[in-house]
Image: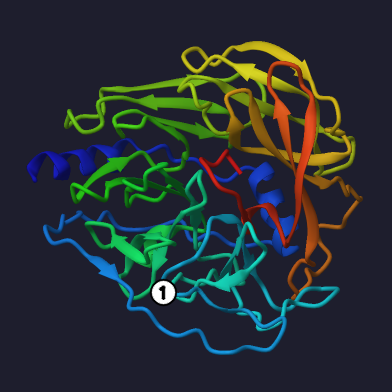
Amino acid sequence: MTWLREMLDDVADDAPQVDLTERTIGIRKRRRRRTTSIVAAAAVVAIALGVTSAVRLQPTQPRPAVAPGTVTDLPARGVGPLSHAFMTFCRPERGKAPAGCVNGGWRVVTRGGTTYRVAQALSGSPSGLRASPLAISRDGRKIAYYDTEADTFAVRDLASGAVITAPTKVPTAWLGSIAHLLLSDDGRFLAFTKRPPLKDPAMLFDMRERMARPLPNGWNPIGLSPDGDTITLAEYAPKTRLQTITRLWQTSTAGNATTVNVAGHYMVGALGLDGHSVVAVESVDAGITGCLRSGADLVHLDRKTGKVLRRVRVRGLSMTANFVYLRGWTGPHEITALAKPLDCRERDDNAPGSSLDPPYVPFTAYAVNVETGKARKLATYTAQGFFQLVLPGFPGTL
């Protein structure tokens, strides 16, 4: 496809060369508690679209008897809707790792509380130099991940066991160090982006029609129209920006993209179910070197101009006592806020970093009404960091 090759060249030439800022590096430091070097060079690789489908239906296998507390691999079929997923690192600096821990491995948890390992998914590297993204559909019935056997992304229906792989290979070198997936509600579309913004392209896949569309690098996908023709992206470093790309499957140039800057530093949540609502949490200096905290309000942003429309004070969740990041929407007026208690301490950046992994700590999810600011508690999860905890629905910027 000539237009796709031309588009990839355009994307490679115009891709924003954005370095991870002190904000992003700070987040990664808190996750790993040591400075991580980012591999920042890659050659431009042309995409060859495959014409063959890769739909697999896993055969039914008997479930062996297991000891209490043992985590088994994800069954071939018959798994109910998911509550969340988390990645495991096995040498926490305090406390115990979960039984049967696989370093960098993904686990999914059903709404009924059953936990499974996703053995097919690529494991994230403890060094942080290779990402392994995972996404859950809004109804919890499908997951997307990087399939190690297929060397590309896959979408799996948990009930039937049907697995559909992306129409083109994606080398692991393309994953960067921080990767993001957005899975459409019906599982048809899958968007992949990553940081740092290397020359190889981010992509949007149409899993049903077996097509791929290049996307700009360095952005987070936060919204996609049901027909897959309009995508909304956000960037939080070195500054907050919003980008909307329309006519994704109808044009062969990048001229249908609109980008706006947001005055201030904000972490943007998923695009609203109405297709245009954007809310965010402001990042505020906590008064301690290298430490930021969340602002007290939910901030409504104009997707087309980047301007702040209004602020809503949050009640029932202490925003300033927590790190708070926004994820998907639980309904037309409520967005999920994922909170971890704020722990800002003066630190010596010249001190040697720990060789151990972060401890497993609680993260609490709240549904926050974007009109009134009232928050209600949903659930508490255990994970090692925001990057290692996935909830159903479109992602926010973290």
Residue 278 on image: x %, y %: 56, 23
Q: Is 5 situated left or right of 39 in this image?
A: left
| Front position in the image: 153 or 85 | 85
Q: Amino acid at mark 1?
A: Ala
Residue 271 on image: x %, y %: 52, 29
| Front position in the image: 297 or 286 | 297
Query: Element under label 1?
Result: loop
Residue at image location 37% in from the left, 29% down from the top = 225
Q: Quadrant of residue 160?
A: bottom left
Colour scheme in the image? rainbow
Residue 140 on image: x %, y %: 52, 51
Residue at image location 54% in from the left, 20% down from the top = 277
Query: Can you identify the residue that label 1 sits on?
Result: 76
Residue at image location 17% in from the left, 61% down from the top = 53
Task: Assign the C terminus to one quadrant of the image.
Answer: top right
Q: Is residue 195 visible?
A: no
Q: Is 55 situated left or right of 308 in this image?
A: left
Residue, far top: 309
